[in-house]
Amino acid sequence: MKTKWGSCNPDKKIVWLNLELAKKPVRAIEYVLLHELAHLISPRHDERFIKVLDDNMPKWRSIRDELNQYPLAAWEDLQALAR
């Protein structure tokens, strides 16, 4: 995947957020952060992962759909800016 809103390395307990999120509504930032933190509980998008999202943000699906309508800069471009 060449573009992402966020990423998580569950083994190292590290979460990265795309700098483009700063331009998005707070609810979108909260969704991405919750999504990535849920990967610390379950690395895959399985039932356990979905339950974390459902329990903590019942409307996460509509927020995700809204967020995915926004443009996203290439992940590699943002990583280069962060260096």
Image: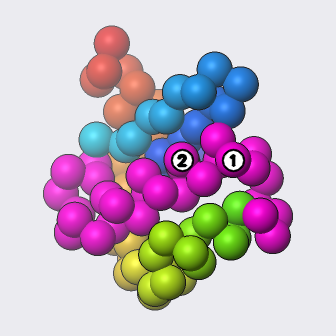
Number of residue marks: 2
Local secondary structure at mark 1: helix
In the picture of the structure, the residue carrying the numbered disc 2 is 37
Chief secondary structure of the magenta portion? helix
Q: Give the residue displayed 67% in from the left and 33% down from the top.
A: 10
Identify residue type, mark 2.
Answer: Leu
* Magenta extent: 20-48
Q: Give the residue displayed 49% in from the left and 34% down from the top.
A: 15
Task: Describe residue 55's horizontal placement relative to residue 66 as left or right.
Answer: right
Proximity of marks 1 and 2: CB atoms separated by less than 8 Å = yes
Q: Is residue 75 visible?
A: yes
Q: Residues within 10 Å of mark 1 (few under 14, many from 20)?
A: few
Quadrant of the snapshot with the C terminus: top left
* 75 to 50, vertically: above or below: above
Q: Nearer the viewer, residue 80 or 45?
A: 45
On residue 41, the disc is 1
Q: In the image, residue 63 lies at what x, y percent?
A: 41, 79
Q: Nearer the viewer, residue 70 or 35?
A: 35
Q: In the image, residue 12 lies at what x, y percent?
A: 63, 20
Kindly give the residue lying farthest to the front in the view shown. 55
Q: Give the residue displayed 64% in from the left and 41% down from the top.
A: 40
Identify residue type, mark 1.
Answer: Ile
* 51 to 6, vertically: above or below: below
Q: Residues within 10 Å of mark 2 (few under 14, many from 20)?
A: many
Q: Give the residue displayed 28% in from the left and 53% down from the top.
A: 21
